[in-house]
């Protein structure tokens, strides 16, 4: 009898525990759905009024109530593209060096230092950007030969602030994320892959190329994770990109990004339509980053195989 | 064995590749060195007692400090932690205890996705929930945004650290007749708690450096304020405002603020590294 009661109370306790913690855990799932719902609701006026034209036109005039977000979309995509072109080779190089080539004694300190790069707040990057990097870019532009400055990619007055400064800051900020995930991916490639390559007489580069090929989906995931960061980065970009809504190929032209326009104009949005237009920009930023992150996670998990919980969250997030 | 031209070429390519990887590491360390050097060299000379004890002076006047902003940041991250830590740790326990369940996968996935959502978007969410209905910027809205950003970090840290606890502890507890909940709360959680708390501190240090979600939730305040339904100053927003101002003395204070932020990040990074290493060593067989 006593035994029976004890076992019943045990199973009772066994029930509230998974249900209780499970309910709390599902908050996180609900939160993602909740953000989407709240933002659709908050941008409804703009979605209804402009439809897809919101993303096809480039007049941004809050006074007359005309909103076209094409320049912001362009600035976000262009700056992220340049940043990823700069950051990807560096991030992969770091990942390979730290997982395959580095002397053992150097490994831990180097991992610590690269992850420190991810921990520096975005506002500090921004300050460094305006006071140090922007004058440097200005000088760099002065050094450009005349014929180069005639091309559409490099023309414009030497302001310093502009797309290149933003892309450089972004590249530095994105590198530690892609590098740390790519390093985990390389670590999860079985050592027999490399041994087989060496046994066939491969050089170091050829063996590492095999490992990269083996983990290719995860490597692509790592790069996409970096892209997701770059698209949503706010403060540092806002401080150096120049905040001028124009569509230009020039790396030296001041431009504008989606995150930056939200940061700059949200508190000024006096009427509902203006506010809804800004929230719609945020909504698209949300959808795009969710898709990119979801896809990159799936790619990374596929390489991680059964040990998906072992692949960490990258070096936490950089504060924005 | 003869060395053919082809072999030489392969070796050169391989050597060049090694050099490229080493250069990649150097090219990431250079900006890190530059940033630390510039911020600290300008910031340390800018730090003075007034910076820590005074509130901002009126526009254009030299002097004053960011005391109210620092207190504001502490209040904001404290409230964020009060909201996020219980939710995060309990969710982390669920994910780690029932790691094969489909809900655990969904939570893990959404935590990763939420972690990748730009903080400015989280700011809009908090604005819609806590600013728009009351027509007023408030400290509460700011800490709501920060709390939402902390949740995924804490879930993943908790999960990772709980998995470090050796299975023998769990088996011993179960063998003595403890329930699953009893095992988790009396045996496994206490064993992992020092690590989890360090993880929370690191999350707090990261969150303390956030600017974007505070711009239109807790806003800014030039005066002392501890009221949660009023705008509240924070170190980051204050640094942002001062960095973009035209005044030299404000630039000086912005550098000082950046130094305080960097110092916090450095201290917490070293602390967490030390704690995880200790924990790893403790649980090594």
Image (tube, rainbow, N blue to C red):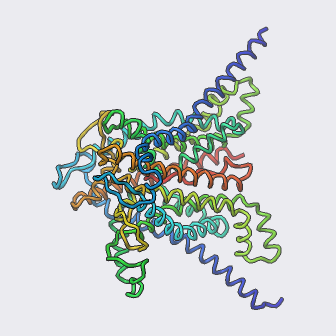
**Relative to residue B246, is residue B267 drawn left or right?**
right
Which residue is nearer to you in this view: B1 or B89? B89
Q: How many marks?
A: 0
For the point 41% across and 66% down, the residue is A166
Q: Identify whether B221 is placed above or below A3.
A: below
**Relative to residue B259, is residue A197 drawn left or right?**
right
Q: Identify whether B203 is placed above or below A242.
A: above
Relative image position of residue B262 (x, y in whole percent): 40, 55
For the point 67% across and 55% down, the residue is A299
Q: Identify whether B60 is placed above or below B130.
A: below
Relative image position of residue A32 (x, y in whole percent): 54, 41
Which residue is nearer to you in this view: B142 or A49? A49
The answer to whether any part of residue B42 appears in the image is yes
Which residue is nearer to you in this view: B13 or B279? B13
Relative image position of residue A118 (x, y in whole percent): 49, 57
Which quadrant is the N terminus of chain A positioned in? top right
> Where is residue A190, by image quadrant?
bottom right
Relative image position of residue B172 (x, y in whole percent): 74, 31
> Where is residue B186, by image quadrant?
top right
**Relative to residue B112, is residue B39 drawn left or right?**
left
Q: Identify whether B7 is placed above or below A157.
A: below
The answer to whether any part of residue B40 appears in the image is no
For the point 61% across and 50% down, the residue is A294
**Relative to residue B113, is residue A100 drawn left or right?**
right
Which residue is nearer to you in this view: A248 or B261? A248
For the point 33% across and 41% down, the residue is B72
């Amino acid at each position: 009898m006593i035994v029976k009661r004890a076992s019943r109370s045990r199973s009772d306790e066994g029930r509230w525990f998974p249900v209780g913690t499970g309910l709390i855990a599902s908050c996180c799932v609900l939160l993602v759905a909740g953000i989407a719902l709240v933002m659709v609701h908050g941008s409804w006026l703009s979605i209804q009024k402009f439809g897809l034209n919101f993303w096809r036109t480039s007049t941004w005039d809050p006074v007359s109530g005309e909103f076209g977000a094409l320049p912001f979309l362009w600035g976000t995509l262009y700056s992220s593209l340049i940043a990823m072109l700069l950051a990807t080779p560096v991030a992969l190089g770091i990942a390979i060096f730290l997982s395959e080539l580095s002397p053992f004694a150097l490994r831990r300190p180097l991992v610590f230092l690269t992850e420190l790069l991810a921990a520096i707040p975005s506002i500090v990057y921004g300050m460094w950007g305006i006071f140090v990097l922007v004058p440097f870019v200005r000088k760099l532009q002065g050094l450009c030969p005349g014929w180069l400055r005639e091309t559409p990619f490099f023309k414009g007055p030497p302001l310093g602030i502009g797309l290149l400064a933003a892309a450089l800051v972004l590249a530095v900020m994105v590198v530690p994320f892609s590098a740390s995930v790519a390093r985990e991916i390389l670590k999860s490639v079985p050592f027999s892959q490399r041994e087989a390559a060496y046994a066939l007489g491969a050089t170091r580069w050829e063996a590492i190329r095999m490992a990269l090929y083996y983990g290719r989906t995860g490597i692509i995931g790592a790069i996409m994770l970096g892209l997701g960061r770059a698209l949503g980065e706010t403060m540092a970009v806002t401080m150096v990109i120049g905040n001028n809504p124009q569509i230009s190929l020039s790396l030296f032209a001041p431009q504008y990004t989606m995150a930056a326009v939200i940061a700059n104009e949200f508190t000024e949005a006096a009427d509902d339509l203006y506010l809804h237009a800004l929230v719609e920009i945020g909504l698209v930023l949300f959808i795009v980053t969710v898709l990119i992150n979801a896809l990159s996670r799936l790619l990374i998990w596929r390489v991680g195989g059964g040990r998906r919980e072992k692949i960490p969250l990258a070096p936490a997030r950089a504060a924005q | 064995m003869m060395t053919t031209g082809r072999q030489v070429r392969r070796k050169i390519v391989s050597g060049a590749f090694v050099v490229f990887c080493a250069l990649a590491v150097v090219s990431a360390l250079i900006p890190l060195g530059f940033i630390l050097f510039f911020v600290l060299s300008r910031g340390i000379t800018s730090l003075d007692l007034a910076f820590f004890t005074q509130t901002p002076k009126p526009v254009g006047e030299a002097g004053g400090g960011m005391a109210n902003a620092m207190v504001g940041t502490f209040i904001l991250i404290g409230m964020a932690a009060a909201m996020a830590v219980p939710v995060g740790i309990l969710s982390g326990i669920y994910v780690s205890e029932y790691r094969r369940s489909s809900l655990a996968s969904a939570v893990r996935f959404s935590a990763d996705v939420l972690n990748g959502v730009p903080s400015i978007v989280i700011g809009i969410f908090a604005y819609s929930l806590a600013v728009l209905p009351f027509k007023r910027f408030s400290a509460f809205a700011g800490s709501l945004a920060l709390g939402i950003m902390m949740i995924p970090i804490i879930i993943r840290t908790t999960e990772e650290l709980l998995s470090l606890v050796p299975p023998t502890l769990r088996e011993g507890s179960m063998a003595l007749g403890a329930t699953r909940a009893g095992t988790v709360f009396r045996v496994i959680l206490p064993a992992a708690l020092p690590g989890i708390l360090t993880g929370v501190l690191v999350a707090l240090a990261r969150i303390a450096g956030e600017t974007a979600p505070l711009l239109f939730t807790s806003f800014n305040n030039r005066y002392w304020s501890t009221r949660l339904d009023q705008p509240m100053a924070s170190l980051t927003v204050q640094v942002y405002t001062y960095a973009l101002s035209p005044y030299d003395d404000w630039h000086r204070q912005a550098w000082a603020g950046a130094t305080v932020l960097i110092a916090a990040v450095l201290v917490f990074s070293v602390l967490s590294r030390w704690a995880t290493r200790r924990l790893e060593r403790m649980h090594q067989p």
